[in-house]
Image (cartoon, rainbow, N blue to C red):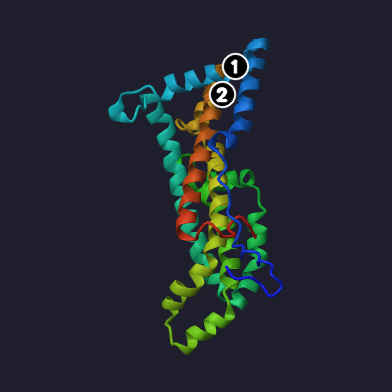
Amino acid sequence: MTETPGGARPAPASGPPRATAVPFLLRWSVLLVAVTCWELAARARGSVYFPPPLQIARHTRDLWFSGPAGHLFLTPAAVDTILPSLGRMAAGFTLAAVAGITLGITVGRSRRAYALCNPVLQFARAVPPPALVPVFVVVFDFGTPMQVASIVFSAVWPVLVNSAEGARATDPLRLEVAAVLRLTAPERLWFLVLPSALPRIFAGLRLSLSLCLILMVFSELLPGSDNGIGFTLTDALTRSDLLTVWSALMLLGALGYLLNTGLLAVEKRLVGPGSSAGRTA
């Protein structure tokens, strides 16, 4: 290190601040404190409506996760409850993602198409999903097609709008360079538009995933459902089986956390840790 003419040593160049890893226990401390308070309060009160979390966890394990290891510890009740719900949710999310990204990129790349379609998009995304249940019942009748259709219709809008906004945000200078280099339309889409829109696309996918979980449960609360987590909720409620009700709620929370964590891992792999995907349109 060299000295300055005045004899003082220059301050070392400081690089970008490094993010300190939050310890595992610190990240989960709020949840741990909340569960502990719930456990103590529930045992002190002794109310049948608010059982202790440990009792709910034991009931959840016995009900769905006490099967043989060869079946991933899933019981027959879990196969009849969890797998149909995940199947409907996966189908709805996949269809919503494919349709939303395709239509969003198409609309976003055309200024005229965006100006024409934007009012329709804003109107359609504002329609509450329960209001469309009679329409879906008439078109699809009760059953899995109606449930998947209701999921797709409501979950497609965040992906579509964010994809269109991401496509519109592509740097015009890069597009001009691509034109000079005579890149084809598929090459411009793959190498320029999609990478530029990817953070916004993942922002829409995260919103869509949470909507899919909510709508999956809602669709299974409707008449005509005979399996799934939503059906289990209503069936347990009619039988006053409050432990199963709380177990289903705990299961939904765990599924939401795991699915969101998986999507965040994919986003980090494709976009990078410094993306701005948390911003939505």
Looking at the rendered structure, the secondary structure element under dot 1 is loop
Residue at image location 48% in from the left, 33% down from the top = 225
Residues at circles 1 and 2 in contact by the CB criterion of under 8 Å: yes
Residue 246 numbered tag: 2
Above/below status of 65 relative to 193: above
Q: Is 1 or 60 nearer to us in this picture?
A: 1
Q: Is 265 or 106 nearer to us in this picture?
A: 265
Question: In the figure, residue 250 lies in which quadrant?
Answer: top right
Left or right relative to 25: residue 269? left
- Number of marks: 2
Circle 2 Cα neighbour tier, 10 Å, few/some/many (<14 / 14–19 / ≥20): many
Residue type at mark 2 is Trp
Q: Is 62 or 13 nearer to us in this picture?
A: 13
Locate the N terminus by quadrant.
Answer: bottom right
Looking at the rendered structure, the secondary structure element under dot 2 is helix
* For marks 1 and 2 on the same chain, the one whose residue lies earlier in the sequence: 1
Residue at image location 28% in from the left, 29% down from the top = 70
In the rendering, at what x and y percent does residue 189 appear?
A: 46, 74
Q: Is 69 or 224 nearer to us in this picture?
A: 69
Residue at image location 48% in from the left, 18% down from the top = 58
Residue 51 numbered tag: 1
Locate the C terminus by quadrant.
Answer: bottom right
Q: CA distance from mark 1 to mark 2?
A: 8 Å
Residue type at mark 1 is Pro
Extreme bottom residue here?
A: 180
In the rendering, at what x and y percent does residue 241 appear?
A: 54, 17
Extreme left residue here?
A: 70
Above/below status of 99 relative to 220: below
| Residue 238 in sight | no
Residue 86 numbered tag: none
| Residue 39 in sight | yes
Circle 1 Cα neighbour tier, 10 Å, few/some/many (<14 / 14–19 / ≥20): some
